[in-house]
Amino acid sequence: MKTDSIFYRLFQSFPSIFFELIQQPPQLANAYQFSSVEVKQLSFRIDGVFLPNSFELPIYFSEVQFQADKKFYSRFFTEVFNYLDKTELTNNWRGVVIFPSSSVDTGETQRYIELLNSQRVNRVYLDELTSTTEPSLGIETVKLIVEPEDTATTKARGLITSAQQQIANEVTQRELIQLIETIIVYKFPHLSREEIEQMLGLCELKQTRVYQEAFQEGKLEGKLEGKLETIPQLLTLGLTVEQIAKALGIEVELVRQVASEKVSSDDTNT
């Protein structure tokens, strides 16, 4: 299963789930921006970084590890400390490592035992996550990743029903349902997308007007996101903010915002 991409989508779309995993208030996600970062000088890529909007809050580095690797901790801490060395941010930091189970946590720890035994690093084992009296839809979706195949379909159908009942925003609801569907697709690679939809009872749902409208709205949001991603390249080519706004058909102020973020990012990396 392509767990890295699933968790990236999960944390990007529903960052509150990350904070639930580490037993922090899900509302804390509102103070963070999630992204995947690369330490360019050494070609290191960190699965996910939650950057806070306040100097008082720590930076969270998240890494998903579903394969046994003796050198995992050596690589993880190298990535973290190189990132801290290259950035001008002065925030404290925390590390979060997500394993499917403790049996995969086989990295050599002797040189890092003080860090691992402190509050600095949080190791999450998905098969040990326990449900509370009011199970979280986000946590239950994460647990679906390690759910046995013989019960995964039933659990996925239950999650889809819960999403329909608990999430009022149609676009957000559709996004979570699509994520649940993607997890099942990865679990059953021998089945076609149509067969998966049939298993999960999605055929009828995808034909409803509400779902179609949510899909279209999400599609439009995706188009806007794609346009925003091209702005730094157009700036590099020498186009003005006004020229870019006209070419992309978006507001000048939106282009200025992206341009300002690019300048800040360039200053941080120099």
Image: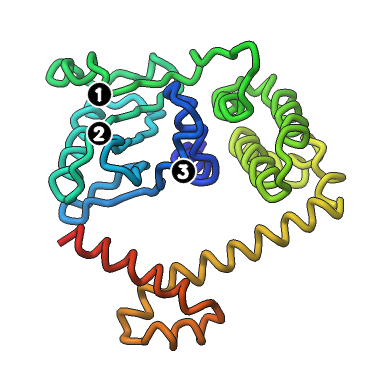
Q: Nearer the viewer, mark 1 or mark 3?
A: 1
Q: Residue at x 18, y 30 (%)?
A: 74
Q: How many angstroms separate mark 3 from mark 2 (CA)?
A: 20 Å
Q: Residue at x 36, y 76 (%)?
A: 233
Q: Is residue 123 above or below residue 41?
A: above
Using residue 30 as the reference point, say whether residue 219 is left or right of it.
right
Q: Are marks 2 and 1 in contact (CB under 8 Å)?
A: yes
Q: Are marks 3 and 2 in contact (CB under 8 Å)?
A: no
Task: Name the residue tied to disc 3.
Answer: 8
Secondary structure of residue under mark 2:
strand
Instruction: Determine the image quadrant of residue 41.
Output: bottom left
Secondary structure of residue under mark 3:
helix
Looking at the picture, how far across and down is residue 222, in whole percent?
Answer: 58, 62
Q: Amino acid at mark 1?
A: Arg
Q: Residues within 10 Å of mark 3 (few under 14, many from 20)?
A: some
Using residue 149 as the reference point, say whether residue 35 is left or right of it.
left
Task: Name the residue tied to disc 2.
Answer: 93
Q: Residue at x 34, y 79 (%)?
A: 235
Q: Is residue 218 above or below residue 64?
A: below
Using residue 118 as the reference point, say whether residue 148 is left or right of it.
right
Task: Name the residue tied to disc 1.
Answer: 120
Between 173 and 52, which is closer to the camera in this rendering? 52
Q: Residue at x 86, y 52 (%)?
A: 207
Looking at the picture, how far across and down is residue 37, in whole percent?
Answer: 31, 50
Q: Earlier in the sequence, mark 1 or mark 3?
A: 3
Q: Earlier in the sequence, mark 2 or mark 1?
A: 2
